[in-house]
């Protein structure tokens, strides 16, 4: 009897430990879903809140799932966005003289755009692969998928849409600079003005300028789309 009486308190203590081990999966799911809905989906635009220690504890392993989204956005903030801005700044021209004198700078900007596209593509592929592997309960999955679309798919798509048009603009600008240099004896540059004494050269330059202007409008449209994603505008 003595041995059995000493075992009863131990069993009771074990039961108390088990009941005090933290929130259940159902509670974790409810907390996670509420966070995704109220902190992200109910607000317009691009909001990527970082978890507090308390939230991480209350979400359990669902915090690791959310990390797929925060890790992707951290990479965007630290690498992709700065590279795009630097490339666009480097590729900015204020006059036709810049087109000729800044060709090396323009070529570097074009290379930076291409490198940024590669970085973005790799980061997105890894995030998509991790997302596809998730085995989520039926109540979590649709909410998480909406958040993933808002914070990963849409901004990545908006960034990717800028790449080809920006690459085209830079390529056309470099081509224009090369053409002017090749026909420098027939061209006079003065700030934003260009005078070509050879009609054929003048016609070619005008055609290149018109194509460049159309491409610049495409870049502006792509940038506006990116801003709409960030702001949450339709």
Image: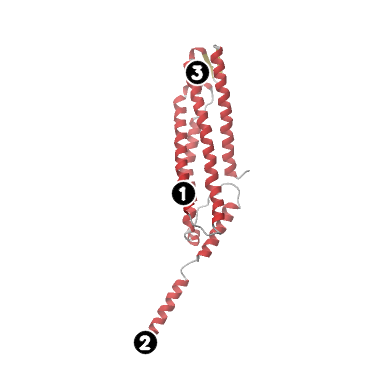
Query: Which residue is identified by label 2?
Result: 2
**Dot 1: what SS?**
helix
Say how many tags the image has.
3
3D distance between C-alphas at marks 2 and 1: 59 Å
- Picture residue at 45% right of the left edge, 40% below the top: 119
- State the image quarter where residue 196 is shown: top right
- Give residue 66's position: percent from left, percent from top: 49, 54
Q: Residues within 10 Å of mark 2 (few under 14, many from 20)?
A: few
Residue pointed to by mark 1: 129
Of the numbered discs in the image, which one, if any, rests on residue 169?
none
Do the residues bearing badges 1 and 3 touch, measured as CB atoms within 8 Å?
no
Foreground residue among 94 and 75:
75
Name which quarter of the figure residue 207 lies in: top right
In this rendering, position of residue 98 left or right of residue 225:
left
Tell me if 115 is positioned left or right of 43 in this view: left
Which residue: 44% across, 30% down?
A: 108
Q: Is residue 31 above or below residue 158?
A: below
Which of the numbered marks, if any, corresponds to residue 180?
Answer: 3
Q: Secondary structure at mark 3?
A: helix
In screen coordinates, is 196 left or right of 11? right
Say what secondary structure mark 2 lies in: helix
- Among all residues in the image, which is located at the extreme left? 3
Rendered residue at 47%/72% (across/down): 19
- Mark with earlier residue (3, 2): 2
User: Looking at the image, do the residues carrying marks 3 and 2 touch, with CB atoms under 8 Å apart?
Assistant: no
Q: Nearer the viewer, residue 195 or 30?
A: 30
Quadrant where the image shows the C terminus: top right
């Amino acid at each position: 009897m003595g041995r059995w009486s000493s075992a009863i308190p131990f069993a009771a203590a074990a039961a108390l430990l088990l009941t005090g081990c933290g929130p259940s999966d159902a509670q974790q799911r409810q907390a996670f879903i509420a966070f995704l809905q109220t902190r992200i989906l109910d607000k317009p635009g691009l909001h990527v809140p970082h978890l507090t220690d308390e939230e991480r504890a209350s979400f359990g392993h669902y915090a690791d799932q959310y990390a797929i989204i925060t890790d992707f956005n951290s990479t965007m903030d630290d690498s992709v966005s700065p590279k795009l801005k630097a490339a666009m700044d480097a590729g900015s021209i204020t006059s036709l003289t810049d087109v000729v004198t800044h060709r090396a700078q323009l070529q570097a900007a074009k290379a930076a755009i291409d490198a940024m596209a590669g970085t973005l593509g790799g980061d997105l592929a890894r995030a998509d692969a991790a997302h596809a592997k998730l085995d989520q309960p039926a109540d979590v999955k649709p909410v998480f998928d909406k958040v993933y679309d808002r914070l990963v798919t849409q901004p990545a798509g908006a960034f990717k849409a800028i790449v080809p048009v920006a690459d085209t603009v830079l390529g056309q600008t470099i081509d224009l600079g090369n053409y002017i240099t090749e026909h420098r004896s027939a061209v006079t540059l003065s700030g934003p003005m260009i005078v070509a004494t050879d009609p054929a050269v003048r016609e070619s330059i005008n055609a290149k300028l018109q194509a460049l202007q159309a491409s610049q409008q495409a870049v502006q449209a792509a940038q506006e789309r990116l801003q709409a994603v960030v702001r949450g505008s339709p």
